[in-house]
Image (cartoon, rainbow, N blue to C red):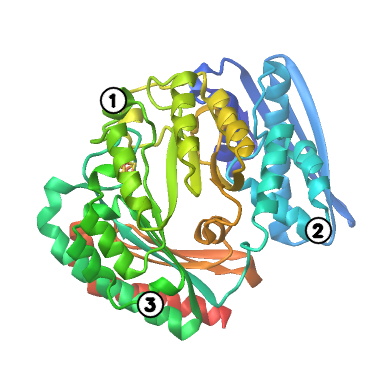
Amino acid sequence: MLDFTTNRIDIENELIDEIKLFFPYLEDCKYKIVHECVEVATESKIEWTNTVSVDDKAFEFNSSVDLPSTVLEIKRLSKRAAKASIFGAIKEVSGIEVPWGSLTGIRPSKLVYDMLGEGVTLNECRKEMQKRFSVSEKKANLICDIVQNQEGFYQKNERLFNLYVHIPFCTTKCNYCSFITEPLHRCKRLIPDYVKTLRREIEDAVSQINARGKLFSVYVGGGTPTALEANEIISLFEGFPFSEVEFTVEAGRPDTITKEKMDALKSLGVNRVCVNPQTLNDQTLNRIGRAHTSADFFEKYALVKQYGFRINVDLIAGLNGETLNDFKYTLDKINDIRPDNITVHTLSRKNGSALKNEGRYENDEVSAMVSYAYDELTRAGYLPYYLYRQKQMLGNQENVGYCLPGTQCANNITTMEDCLSVIACGAGAITKIVLPSENRIERFADVRDVRLYLQTFEEKLKDKQKFCEKQFTNIF
Ligand code: SF4
């Protein structure tokens, strides 16, 4: 039971997230932690004194903001100071190193872009990330390299839109998955209706986009889009001019890939395909609930390669029972076949996943795995080009997209960095309207349950249209 008190009840959960950086399982934190924040406002500034005691050791942290400043900015800085104080005190007492320092709930690249906006140079950002947020030197360099590698792809434009299409079906469920996906065998009968309805939603999204600006990229994800049959994929996308933009389809599970489906993707103008083994160790694949082998992966990868698609391969560090040597084996084999893009995820203990429900899970070698991936892939000429973090990632690590130079996925960058609005279609898909002038993002979520999505589609489509209309009025 965590023994923690604070007078900042309004941000208590975010402060607890700082404690979780050191103790992912809060019951492991045996300290008594008391936090108090005192705010003093003068005419020219607001000062905060954050006092944190960890057992019998007390620490004081002082910070301030010059006035005038916006309410939002004051709130942001006061929260940041409180979080940093908890982080600093526990770090001092426990001696535990945390790779991303006190950062929680924010994309590290956003902070770098914010600093660049303030006139700080990229090289200074490397130092500032360490100084302001206690980020390790290695991670500070990584995120600054990523920002550098986004040059030419990172762009904010209110008139360019990404389109996301969600296919919530999978052949089996992976043990780390928390998405609402329907096992294929249980929902075969729903698929024809889903395809028809989703097509209607895509048509509506495309006309919304055309009325306001231009399509920038299309991303079809899930679930496993290639769980659909070739004729279903064709009826979903036939007739749209998506071949003119970056058009990605996740063919995530090798066991769903067939020649007919690849012919279909080619004829539709798809130009980027993800084939995701996650690991090349057959025992692990079996253990985590994927219905394919490493041989299936190589066979299907060779097939996909014949079509000239740009290929992404997803891997996961920290899978159940995997050692550093297991991970090295996978990474080296993938490195040998040189896909255009390799995305290295760190296993996250997601709420609702079988992994999480089974109880505690840790992997002591995960940091070494992530480090190995970075060292080997950069040595082999890959560039890290986007990064995101999730809650409850093993070892407080991150997910990194690597690419051969010039093969950056523009959708990943502009979506992940909240540069462009995303109009999303399908059960559980989340439309995101980026309002740069107001530094704000508004979201609209489609119904998650497939049956309910089908039943309530007409009504919900009207809600979505009204939502978009309202947001667009703010922009244009
Ligand atoms: S393939 Fe992806 S969406 Fe499907 S169960 Fe596995 S993790 Fe979940």
Q: Which of the four quarters of the rendered structure image does ligand 1 lie in? A: top left
Q: Residue at x 60, y 38 (%)?
A: 380
Q: Amino acid at mark 2?
A: Glu
Q: Position of residue 441 (x, y in %)?
A: 54, 64
**Numbered disc in front, either 2 or 1:** 1
Q: Residue at x 70, y 17 (%)?
A: 95
Residue at the disc numbered 1: 287
Q: Amino acid at mark 1?
A: Arg
Residue at the disc numbered 2: 118
Check residue 241 in the rendering and tell me which mark sits there, or answer none.
3
- Secondary structure under badge 3? loop
Q: Quadrant of residue 461?
A: bottom left
Residue 126's place in the image compared with 154, above or below, is above
Quadrant for the C terminus, please.
bottom right
**Numbered disc in front, either 1 or 3:** 3
Q: Is residue 82 visible?
A: no
Tell which of 61 and 363 is nearer to you: 363
Whether residue 426 sits left or right of residue 375 in the image: it is left
Q: Is mark 2 within 8 Å of ligand 1?
A: no
Q: Amino acid at mark 3?
A: Pro
Residue 226's place in the image compared with 212, above or below, is above
**Numbered disc in front, either 3 or 2:** 3
Q: Quadrant of residue 278?
A: top left
- Secondary structure under badge 1? helix
Q: Position of residue 270 (x, y in %)?
A: 37, 64
Whether residue 399 sits left or right of residue 54 in the image: it is left
> Extreme front residue here?
306
Upstream in the sequence, badge 1 or badge 3?
3
> Extreme bottom residue here?
211
